[in-house]
Amino acid sequence: MGKRIAVLVSGGGTNLQALIDAQQRGELGGGEIAAVISTKTGAFALERAAKAGIPGYVVPRKEYPSNQSFTVAMVEQLKGLHIDLVVLAGCMVIFTEELVKAYPNAIMNVHPALIPSFCGEGYYGLHVHEKALEYGVKLSGATVHFVSEECDGGPIIAQKAVEVRHDDTPEVLQKRIMEQAEWKLLPEAVSLFCQDRITVEGRTVIIK
């Protein structure tokens, strides 16, 4: 029985598209994207899901008084769909500990930098690339990690470095990191999980 994957989104869903494309090529290790869940109505990611024949759901953050009540509702939705792996793909909300407790080492996030650089609170979207360019690093990249209660602090599954060029803008760097790292790494990490090839020992992820 293949693993059931839910992809959580808030916006355009470019990383979702990379996963859909990988699934259509048979590259998710026997897993299937069983649901795309948006934290807001009208997210373009839901159109991508519909086009691929994947059920879409909305758990709107703005209808809940707190991050905690929202997280509890999301966990209920995930459990109701019998989800095995949760993938955060441009999901711009803060979840509280209930999600991690419900899915220990079964929530993946992709971060557009080489953790522990340029990560943590406030480092999201273009901000990450602005900070990397300000610092003058020669390499940046992407990290796929399990989600823990610490922001961007969970065990690292995979990383890929991408060169930074002297004339990069944050937008140009963002696009290069997506194309060369994020869209490759995330489907690979999901595939490894679905093949039961990942074990976590403390902070270290071991790939069999």
Image (spheres, grey):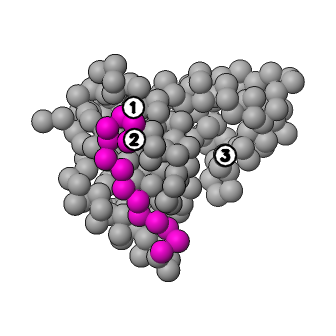
Report if residue 54 lies within the magenta region: yes
**Residue type at mark 2?**
Ala
Q: Which residues are magenta?
A: 50-63
Q: Position of residue 176 (x, y in %)?
A: 67, 25
Q: Earlier in the sequence, mark 3 or mark 1?
A: 1
Q: Decide if residue 160 is on the left or right side of residue 8.
A: right
Alpha-carbon span between mark 3 and mark 1 = 21 Å
Alpha-carbon span between mark 1 and mark 2 = 8 Å
Residue under numbered circle 2: 49
Alpha-carbon span between mark 2 and mark 3 = 22 Å
Task: Give the residue at the far left of this rendering.
Answer: 1
Seen at 25% across and 33% down, the residue is 31
- Can you tell which of label 1 and label 2 is closer to the viewer? 2
Q: Position of residue 181 (x, y in %)?
A: 56, 26
- Mark 2 residue element: helix
Question: In front here: 41 or 64?
Answer: 41
**Residue type at mark 1?**
Ile
Can residue 167 be seen here? The reply is yes
Residue under numbered circle 3: 125
- Mark 3 residue element: loop
Quadrant where the C terminus sits is top left
